[in-house]
Image (cartoon, grey):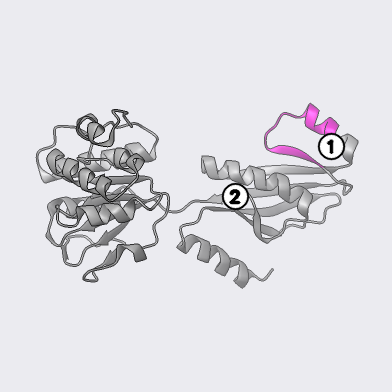
Amino acid sequence: MKQREFTRFIDHLAERGEPFVVATVVGVHGSSLGKPGFKAVVSKEGRVVLGTIGGVCPESVVASMAQDALRTGKARLVKVHLEDAEAAVDGALANRDPDEVYVETNCGGTMEVYVEPYLPANRLILIGQGGRDDVEDGLVKMGNAAGFETVVIDHSPVLTEDPDVLITDLDYDLERFEFAESDSVVVLTKGERDVATLEVLSRRKLKFVGLLASLARASGDVARLRERGVDPAFLLSLHSPVGVDIGAVTAEEVVVSIMADVIATLRGKHAPHAAFLEAVGGELGTGTAR
């Protein structure tokens, strides 16, 4: 495999926000079809989609370990023993090291494979309404500081710090935007475009969707979205009024509360929006909390 082909392929995956793993043979002892420097790209589904590390047998176990690496986000160095059937069974029974595996084949050698996960950057996507918005401006600043890739979709934002991506097309069609499952989206449309924006987001699989609105406006938006046939599960998952309840009053405090809500969700911590759920539960025919 040519280096140029390899780099183009993984750049393409990264641009699309696809998680993947690069498995690289870094050492070989004894007989092995794979040689140091052999590389394979493994998809999130556990399939080798480019390259090779030396055949189906070692690739099948490394692909499984690649999926584990994507779940943990941690690289690992794996020893793959290429043994005959009897030795492979004996080795598997005797060795409990998760980074050491035995594969049934007749090569007789051992491969050391570095399994490195590539996860998409956490993106904070802000959908604005135009004009000065201190919350939008503060979220760009704090998102940048917290290591997010910040994206602003707003036809006329007033910002004191540049986001990583700025889309200012008037009447931008949100359907065109390529969302990733790891994206956190905060809707700052101030009522006029709430429903149309949330309807598009309801058709995407996203980590976090928050709406900055009063409880009354959020409840009204939910009623209209329900009339449009939006999945109730999406409506119940909506973070609104977005932000952890810290008693925020100023714009700066609201920004802190929103970022806390986003980060808590990314880290698997539950930040309940009890008032919203109580308000819309009857509308949706359920009182189930998120």
What quarter of the picture does the C terminus occupy?
A: top left
Q: Earlier in the sequence, mark 2 or mark 1?
A: 2
Please give the name of the residue rendered at 88% of the width and 39% of the height, measured from the top-left corner: 85
Residue 273 is at least partly visible in this image: no
Between 254 and 175, the one lying in front of the other is 175
Residue 171 is at least partly visible in this image: yes
Amino acid on which the number 2 mark rests in the picture: Glu
Between 120 and 192, the one lying in front of the other is 192
Residue pointed to by mark 1: 88
Could you tell me which secondary element the residue under label 2 belongs to? loop
Indicate the quadrant where residue 159 lies: bottom left
Instruction: Please tell me the numbered disc located at residue 45.
Output: 2
Magenta residue span: 89-103
Horizontal and vertical percent for residue 59?
A: 72, 50
Please give the name of the residue rendered at 38% of the width and 45% of the height, measured from the top-left corner: 207
Horizontal and vertical percent for residue 80?
A: 75, 43
Please give the name of the residue rendered at 9% of the width and 42% of the height, measured from the top-left corner: 250
Q: Is 210 contained in the magenta span?
A: no
Horizontal and vertical percent for residue 119?
A: 49, 51
What quarter of the picture does the N terminus occupy?
A: bottom right
Could you tell me which secondary element the residue under label 1 belongs to? helix
Indicate the quadrant where residue 160 lies: bottom left
Residue 60 as seen in the image, left or right of residue 123? right
Instruction: Please tell me the numbered disc located at residue 181.
Output: none
Between 9 and 100, the one lying in front of the other is 9
